[in-house]
Amino acid sequence: MAVTIQDIAKLRKMSGAGMMDCKNALEESNNDFEKAMEIIRKKGQAVAAKRSDREAAEGCVLSADKDGFAAIVALKCETDFVAKNAEFIELTQNILNTAMDKKPANKEELLALPLADGRTIADHITDRIGVTGEKMELGAYEYISGASSISYIHPGNKLATVAAFNEAIEHQMARDIAMQIAAMNPVAVLPEQVDQHIIDQELQIAREKALEAGKPENLLDRIAQGALQKYYKENALLQQEFVKDSKLTIEQYLHTGSKTLTVVGFKRFTLNAD
């Protein structure tokens, strides 16, 4: 049976594959659409195996928030051309929608969840690999929860943040915090939440710099502690200067809304070099 343009268009709509891939799959399967879909899927699996050692440094990063829960999803690929493709962005959005709905505990659980057609997210990513010929992977799944939450996607879909709060917060204030996290890349909410290895590293660097500058050895620890406090001010979210008003720290800005308002957690993911 000859393959018609209508048949190719139908399979293309079903699979998202290119015209020639659909034509070849239909010819190979004698116009059996189920077999043709399987041929296209196997091609995706073969391409995925072949390109497994490639670097997927581009992609699409999206985030969302609802009822105190917020999540970030990053679908990675090899080129910016594919990252900007509407179907690639749509797949990323569908993955995010599923994460928001099902709230999986980790990336592996998310990959195993089905999309609308009943096939898993992992299968859909493999299908897109076959369509584009590029390596793709779920690069990130991060989530946070609290009494209220916010999400922010930086223009270009390369950077997204989410934050959660201990109580209700006015939307613009919450968005300001999410944008602060995007711009200033804090490492923790509070100084006491900074990883100990980072603290040790900062103290060591400060001591070495002071020693190189000829400072007395009995002052090195005091100088190092001063440098650490500066590090906290620059990298602990609540101590950072508010980017929209440097006279306020983020904690002070939050307290203009409520004296008990604070950030309980945040996540940030970017494909850009910070």
Image: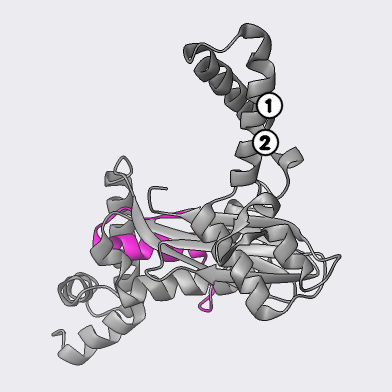
Q: Is residue 246 left or right of residue 213?
A: right
What range is drawn magenta here? 116-138
What secondary structure is marked by label 1? helix
Q: Position of residue 44 (x, y in %)?
A: 31, 59
Q: To which quarter of the image does residue 250 belong? A: bottom right
Front residue (pair 40, 268) = 268
**Amino acid type, callout 2:** Gln
- Name the spot of residue 216 as percent of width and height, x first: 60, 9
Q: Is residue 142 visible?
A: yes
Q: Which residue is mark 1?
A: 225
- Mark 2, residue position: 229
Query: Does residue 55 show up magenta in the picture?
Result: no
Q: Is residue 134 left or right of residue 269?
A: left
User: Is the residue 44 above or below the residue 22 in the image?
Assistant: above
> Quadrant location of residue 169?
bottom right
Front-most of residues 15 and 77: 77
Decide: marks 1, 2 in contact (CB < 8 A)? Answer: yes
